[in-house]
Image (cartoon, rainbow, N blue to C red):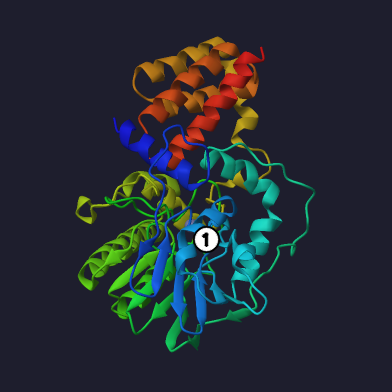
Amino acid sequence: MQMPKIVSVALFLCIAMGMTAQAAPDPPKMVKINDSVYMAPTAGNVYLITTPAGNVVIDTALRDQAAAAKNLLAAEIHGPVKYIILTHGHVDHIGGINLWKEPGTQIIAQRNYVEFVNYVTRLDGFFAPRNAAAFGRPPKTVGDWAGNYAAKIDPTIFFDESYKFSLGGVDFELFSTPGETPDHLTVWLPASKIAFIGDNYNGAGLPEPMSFPNIYPLRGSKPRWALDWISSIDKVLALKPEIVLSGHGDPIIGNAEVTRRLTRYRNAIQYVHDETVKGMNAGKDVYTLMQEIKLPASFDLTESFGKVSWSVRGIYEGYAGWYDMNPSNIYELPPASVYPDLVRLAGGPDAVTRLAEGKMDAGKPIETLRLTDVVLAFDPNNNAALSTRLKALEYLRDHSENYVEAGMLERGISNTKEKLASK
Ligand SMILES: [Zn+2]
């Protein structure tokens, strides 16, 4: 049982995502990285780089937290904001753009930003309830579909591979480093050997021990290409940074520690990617590989944020799409279309529910879920099946060491309870 850890991580993320927390944590304080680089550790770290000719801001936090982040940095803000750099287009990095933007402020993003924010906006109605479940917040109201290209595009400067500028004698070098998103960029300050890498390491801001990344997040995503992610980390390592500053979590200080952590992370992604590809080439199906591929303990990474099995499936289906060479799956009818027939064959829902309960007693809650799927396809309001399902969901939640999984199970639990209460 790892619940205390999960609860604390969930609490951390609730705070990070701007939710009301029961226990008030210590308020975040500004972190001084050096004499000209400052960090506001909020939901999405915000960085301020000061120069004699004005300021550069890297990322702007979630909209709800943007003002608090700016306030943390207020004492160091002298002169105009000349540039805002967006490490990527996720909402917890772009929410405060308007707070920082002044007349004449240039906003820089990698060119894939445009399609990325359009994609997120295009599928707003699809993502809204999934994001709400993943982050344990109430679903937001979504308006009418705004179309394919409806996102607000704030950046004024886009680049493909790299972009350089100087401000007040400080050189800034930007590189395309796709990973968690296709528009990810890295900001490199050669003089101070600091790399700002967005969410390509520690996208959840977890303290050590670090988790394997979410190569596939349950809330849904286009493929996060593992090989791109690996080569982006390699690009950062080749700079030999002394300090790495992430979109979430604490600074990584010292090249030895940077190298140790980032190498471990990229090697773990490489391992899972390569084992998946080898299994695909050997003709193995996705479920077999989800069960077979385990991260060796030597990587010393947890699965509290990203799960290896989800990543295996994300990589597999990212490469192959949905067809699994079973001709039954060419057609529109889902497996559940014949579940009612199976229930009738078994003599009715009670027999199948008893089987589901037996699986629960035998410590097989996932089989219980599958069997209650069968009963509920026959009778969506079957009281006994809903109650058995609830037990399985609660068991899985209580034994989960992954807070995203726990959040999704929590949503399943509340949906099941609602159905039971409405009877
Ligand atoms: Zn983020």
Q: Position of residue 301 (x, y in %)?
A: 28, 52
For residue 120, which quarter of the picture?
Answer: bottom right
Q: Is 82 placed above or below 116 here? A: below
Residue at image location 74% in from the left, 65% down from the top: 149
Please state, as top left, top right, bottom left or bottom right, where the C terminus lies in the image: top right
Residue at image location 38% in from the left, 41% down from the top: 9
Q: Position of residue 339 (x, y in %)?
A: 60, 26
Residue at image location 50% in from the left, 21% down from the top: 389
Q: Is 102 placed above or below 135 here? A: below
Q: SS for tag 1? A: helix
For label 1, the crowd category at 10 Å Cα-Cα, with few meaning under 14, some 14 to 19 and many 20 or more, is many
Pick the front one: 365 or 119: 119
Residue at image location 39% in from the left, 72% down from the top: 37
- Residue at mark 1: C-beta within 8 A of ligand 1: no
Residue 285 seen anywhere in this rendered image of the structure: no
Pick the front one: 73 or 270: 73
Q: Position of residue 51 (x, y in %)?
A: 45, 81
Per the image, the residue denoted by label 1 is: 70
Q: Position of residue 147 (x, y in %)?
A: 78, 59
For residue 97, which quarter of the picture?
Answer: bottom right
> How many labels were placed on the picture?
1
Q: Is 288 placed above or below 104 here? A: above
Identified by mark 1, the residue type is Lys
Please state, as top left, top right, bottom left or bottom right, where the N terminus lies in the image: top left
Residue 278 seen anywhere in this rendered image of the structure: yes
Pick the front one: 349 or 44: 44
In the drawing, does residue 254 fall left or right of residue 16? left
Q: Is 380 placed above or below 140 here? A: above
For residue 99, which quarter of the picture?
Answer: bottom right
